[in-house]
Image: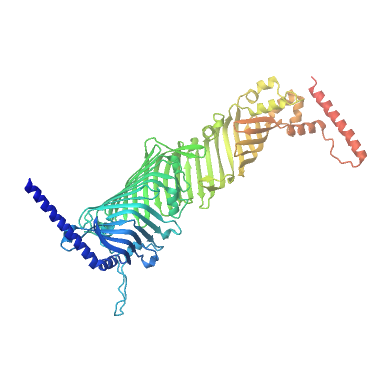
Amino acid sequence: MRILTAGLGLVALALLGLVAFAVLNLRALVGVHQDRLVARVERVLGRSVAVGAVSPSWWPLGIRLRDVTVGEDPTFGSAPFLTAEGIVLGVRAWPLVRGRIEASGVTLEGPRLSVVCAANGRWNVESLGASRAREPAGGSAPRGRRTGLRVPIEWVVGLALGRVREGTITIDDRRLGAAAPFVLRHVSVRATDLRVGASARIGVEAALFAANEPDVRLDLRADALGERDAEHTPFSARVEIDDAELAPLSERLGRPRLASGRLRRLALVLEGTLARLRATLAVEAVDPAVRIGALPFGALRPIALRARVRRDGAAAVIEDLHAAIGSLVVRGSGEATLDPRRASLVLRSEGEGAAELALGERTVALRAVAGRLVIEPAGVSFAPLALEIDDVPVSLRGGVAGVDPPAIDLRIESRPFGGTLAADVAVEATGAARARVEAAAIDLGSATARLVPELAGRVEGRGGGAAAFTGRIAAGALVAGSLAGSGTLAVADGRLREVNLPGLVVAEVEALPFMPRLVSASTRERYRELFGGPDTVVESATLPFAIARGRLTTERAVLVNPAYQIAGDGWLDETRALRFRGTVLLGASVSRTLHDDVRAAKYLATEDGRIALPFVARGRLGAVRIEPDAKRLRARGLEALLGASDTTRPSPGADAERRDRRRDERVEDRVIERLERLLRP
């Protein structure tokens, strides 16, 4: 036991002696080669280097540089490229004992790195490792300086990133104009096995959106480090971003309206080489405020997107795209090219799931997606894309250019409610919108139940028509009051359930004071469907209309039935308030019967002898009141009672006023006398 203890003591003393000798060698080497060390770093980086102090570091064993500043490429300005509170160059102990320095890694303490891309697309890091051009003593022209990264890969990715503590990286892409730079704070880097031929691993954490906690993580593995160029070095990488705020990201890209809301998670996995690469992307979003341009994707939450891509040179194959939007699952595949930048995708949904999209107070369901998308820098085109919107099949052709704001040019074809619909829709980037719509054979019962629930079960028939509209779009919605247009609607074989418009108007007219019964019991029995039926039967109807300032107006709406006709004018506003001024014009046969029943009916007759019953409809859809138009009834009745007597000729003077009063009294007497005779049994 004593021999073992003595042996261990001798080994410990030997080790301490070697460490002491290594430390003395380190101190001596630093003292002798301090200036040469800084000069060598300058030559390697191709940048000016300023160091406040160089001293030995006892732990970790190495050389410590304090207050380090690395100059910027002069073409990018005079601000420093890199500043650091300290840089520790770790060295291996055994080579140091023999008087040589072998680096074991570099630790950066509190570095602040500025990465800049000029407007011409050139990055300031491209000149790292390029020796600065110097004028030779003989006056000959300086050597041309190559562009590109000159530092050996074990310096650029390895030693220079051996370890970073509390760093800050600012990325300023000046191609984006006045966009704010990206700032990565609290950057922490740990690298291992950074040796030529080894499988190096680098882990990075940083805060991009959060104030203090890391929300960006990178894990990188590079095999056979330094044995091949960067294009053919095999590697694998995983990037994760948590709680990504899209609004500040859009602002930093110089496009503040590009996107908003929060992505819960984004993960990107890369494998292979830069020349032959496989990529897998996963995105999750549950924030209802997520918008891409004016499109409210957050209303479709939750969203989960996965894509697997294989790159081979300038071409890429999209092997599998899996998008889950709500309960809607869409799969796709396709191909892409980098020059020109273009991707083509074939999509098809799986199962019966649907994505619920909230549009104002309404919610629509999207399902049954199938078709082809082409994505280019100019936008997205549909060639074509089919889907169902609230169980209505829709086909889209055309495209959308940009998202901030979007410009839309689409041909929409659909088969809604058992009919057909075709529309050409165009929205300019300024927000100006126009559309031309044609429809035929629409089932009005199904359409009103879906679009106007308060009228569900009360409207039947087939409808169609054509119209042209203009308007203005802002923030993905129609600007209030901007819709304008005109067109014509037509209805055939229709029916208004639970309202008999002619019977209701007759009843309201008969309820007026001094008005006798217009329809006798025998006449009601003879024309039972007209006066006693529960519904209004529409053989055909036409409604020419115009829309302006939030109101739909018609000047000549006509409803035709074999026994009568209804015509009139009115309006319907955006609050669904309605006012219609119309006339029920009974057919010739019904009018003759009423003439025979009631003498007073002749005072409601038109020149051709048909009975005309003026009415007014007012209220909100689902609660509309029908009442006789008393003003028009009075005008028609007095004219018939008074005949052609002239009551409007002016007579100036006091005597004329007395004559007018006496004449008015005689007129009133005559009206009363005639009414009494009409009402006398």
Compared to residue 101, the image places residue 554 above or below, namely: above
Q: In which quarter of the image is residue 124?
A: bottom left
Q: Is residue 8 visible?
A: yes
Q: Quadrant of residue 99?
A: bottom left
Residue at figure coordinates x 76%, y 26% from the top left: 600
| In this rendering, position of residue 85 left or right of residue 502 | left
Q: Which residue lies furthest to the bottom in this view?
A: 138
Q: Is residue 271 visible?
A: no
Residue 215 on image: x %, y %: 36, 47
- Looking at the picture, the colour scheme in use is rainbow
Residue 90 on image: x %, y %: 24, 58
User: Is 131 in front, or is 26?
Assistant: 26
Compared to residue 555, the image places residue 428 above or below, namely: below
Compared to residue 127, the image places residue 294 above or below, namely: above
Which quadrant is the N terminus positioned in?
Answer: top left
Residue at figure coordinates x 39%, y 35% from the top left: 352
Residue 8 on image: x %, y %: 11, 50
| In this rendering, position of residue 154 left or right of residue 575 | left
Residue at figure coordinates x 44%, y 56% from the top left: 180
Count of labels in the image: 0
Q: Which residue lies furthest to the right in this view?
A: 655
User: Is 358 in front, or is 197?
Assistant: 197
Which quadrant is the C terminus positioned in?
Answer: top right
User: Is 675 in front, or is 283?
Assistant: 283
| In this rendering, position of residue 394 left or right of residue 100 | right
User: Is 673 in front, or is 351?
Assistant: 351
Residue 606 on image: x %, y %: 73, 33
Q: In which quarter of the image is residue 234?
A: bottom left
